[in-house]
Amino acid sequence: MEHHKNSEEKSGITTGSCATAASVAALLTILDKSPAVVNIIAPNSQLTAEIYDTKKLSDTQAEAIVEKPTYNDPDVTRGIKIVSQVCLTDNIGEVEITAGEGVGVVTKPGLQIPVGEYAINPVPRKMIKENIKRFLPDNKGAIVKIIIPEGKEIAPKTMNSRLGIIDGISILGTTGIARPMSNKAYTDSLRVQLDVASANGYEELLFVPGNIGTRIANERLVIDEDAIIEMSNFVGYMLDEADKMDAFKSITIFGHAGKLIKIAAGIFNTKQSVADARREIMTAYSGLCGADTNTLQRIFDCITTEDVIKILDENNLTTDVFELIGDKIEELCELKYNIKFHAIIVKMNGEILNPSKTDTIPFEWK
């Protein structure tokens, strides 16, 4: 049995597992057991969760709180309190799940939950129902209401708004165990954007590495939010998934030079600890465009891509270098995937570094 308790562990438990544990604790509190810990059954394991607080509200109603444990991952939901209120009913064996404050509502198609419902994914719903039924009195049913007091406050720090989930966070989980963001849980959360884009009929997408690309795209382009796909460092993974769906005509890779130049060297995981090589890439492409030995050494000695751009500006090489890099990004992507690709490379201030590509993308400029 896995017991997730402190931040020394490499993994934690999902919001879905916390909601399940709180629900079981609330039911047991109605039955006068008020547990300090509960054991729950997850899809592939059994988990133990500590209970932060319990309160019996009446003979048929109680609530319990679980504080989501911290673990080795920068998840904004770490440490939040998840409340479950359980009320016994006379609907024998029936468990109804609803939600309240801090749990988001789905407003766009493409997710696992229908539009208009609370964003509690199928696996957590199933976990809550199955674990409640383990302890439910034979002649009773239950209504389970999940509340996340801090949910609305932290929602802007998540991807929820991009996915059409409003007024709170979603309750996720496929295994009950929260893994660090470099693993499957994080890439799955990125992939959901493709489902939303496809469900809403978008065939031309704009892929960005993260917040910088998103900000500049919104400043410079006339584009719907659902057509902008954040890929983080997982360029190859996201392009693989888009290609498998066979739903998209073109992808424009749009973002800051510091990330995008890596793709021109065939690096499809741009995380610095996996592969950096920025100065080597910039030195090679600058050499191909005619930079002399002294300039190449200065470029190789630079710490940031923005510093490289200053040197290229001094030598009137910026456009030539980034046009070549943009061409190579498109070429390498089209060799790997059956999709039309465009590449737009920008500086921090939004300036386009390969301007010949601006008329080729399927989006209107502001």
Image: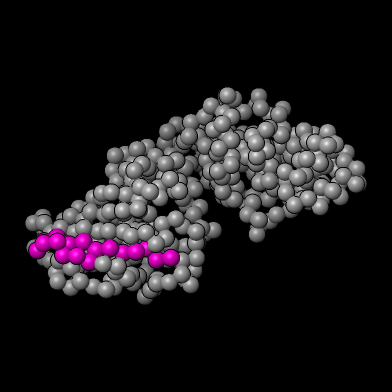
Does residue 258 lie above or below 177 as drawn?
above
Q: How many marks?
A: 0
At 29% from the left and 73% from the top, the residue drawn is 37
Using the rendered view, name the quadrant where residue 78 is placed: bottom left
- Where is residue 292 drawn, in percent x and y? 91, 43
Of residues 19 and 183, the one nearer the viewer is 19
Indicate yes or no whether the magenta region holds residue 56: yes
Relative placement, left or right, of 143 versus 121 is left
- Where is residue 349 drawn, in percent x and y? 65, 36
At 50% from the left and 59% from the top, the residue drawn is 74
Indicate yes or no whether the magenta region holds residue 152: no
Using the rendered view, name the quadrant where residue 144 is placed: bottom left
Of the 4 image quadrants, the one containing the N terminus is bottom left
Segment colored magenta = 54-70
Does residue 182 lie above or below 316 as drawn?
below
- Where is residue 187 drawn, in percent x and y? 51, 52
Q: Residue furthest bottom?
A: 1
